[in-house]
Image: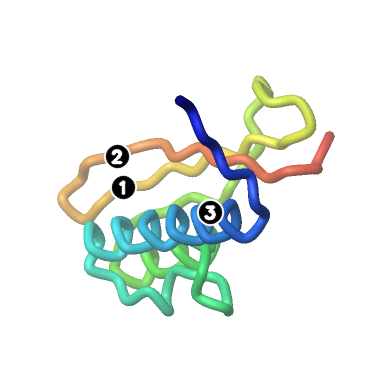
Amino acid sequence: MKTATKSPELQAALKAAKLAAAVSRVADATGMDRSEITTQDGTQLDTFKFLDAMRARGYQVSEPRIPQAQTRRGHTAWKVDITVPAGVSVQLVFFTPGVTQ
């Protein structure tokens, strides 16, 4: 028998737990303090604060730019080039909702 509770409180608690786990993983993986990389209330990763914290640690981080190909309707993709001090480069893409060109 399948029982699923759709209470708003349960859904909010599950979402908060998922966000907290994501913030913990990023903080642990990067060695950054959570206050450096989260929103003011500490519940969500703040992409721009995260990029600023990387710059402060000597990473080369380009300014976010909008790539020509947009893959999510109703969202804008942003691309950032990141080079760590050891010389390895990656491209990070993130989306902002409700922004259109």
Seen at 21% across and 56% down, the residue is: 85
Asked whether the residues under the numbered discs 2 and 1 touch, taking CB atoms below 8 Å apart as contact, a structural biologist would say yes
Q: Which residue is mark 1?
A: 83
Q: Using the image, determine if residue 88 lies above or below residue 68.
A: below
Q: Quadrant of residue 31 in the image?
A: bottom left
Q: Which residue is mark 3?
A: 15
If you read the primary sequence from the N terminus, does the residue marked by circle 2 or circle 1 appear first?
Answer: 1
If you read the primary sequence from the N terminus, does the residue marked by circle 1 or circle 3 appear first?
Answer: 3
Query: Which element type, helix, strand or loop, lies under badge 3?
Result: helix
Q: Quadrant of residue 101 in the image?
A: top right
Seen at 79% across and 32% down, the residue is: 74
Cα distance in 3D space between marks 3 and 2: 32 Å
Q: Using the image, determine if residue 71 lies above or below residue 85.
A: above
Q: Amino acid at mark 1?
A: Thr
If you read the primary sequence from the N terminus, does the residue marked by circle 3 or circle 2 appear first?
Answer: 3
Quadrant housing the N terminus: top left
Query: Which element type, helix, strand or loop, lies under badge 1?
Result: strand
Seen at 44% across and 40% down, the residue is: 92
Q: Mark 3 packing: few (<14 Cα in 10 Å), some, or many (20+)? A: few
Relative to the observer, which residue lies in front, 24 or 84? 24
Q: Amino acid at mark 3?
A: Lys
Picture coordinates of residue 34, whole percent (x, y):
37, 74
Relative to 94, 30 lies left or right: left
Asked whether the residues under the numbered discs 3 and 2 touch, taking CB atoms below 8 Å apart as contact, a structural biologist would say no
Picture coordinates of residue 91, whole percent (x, y):
41, 36
Query: Could you say which disc has been placed on residue 10 in the image?
Result: none
Q: Which residue is mark 2?
A: 89
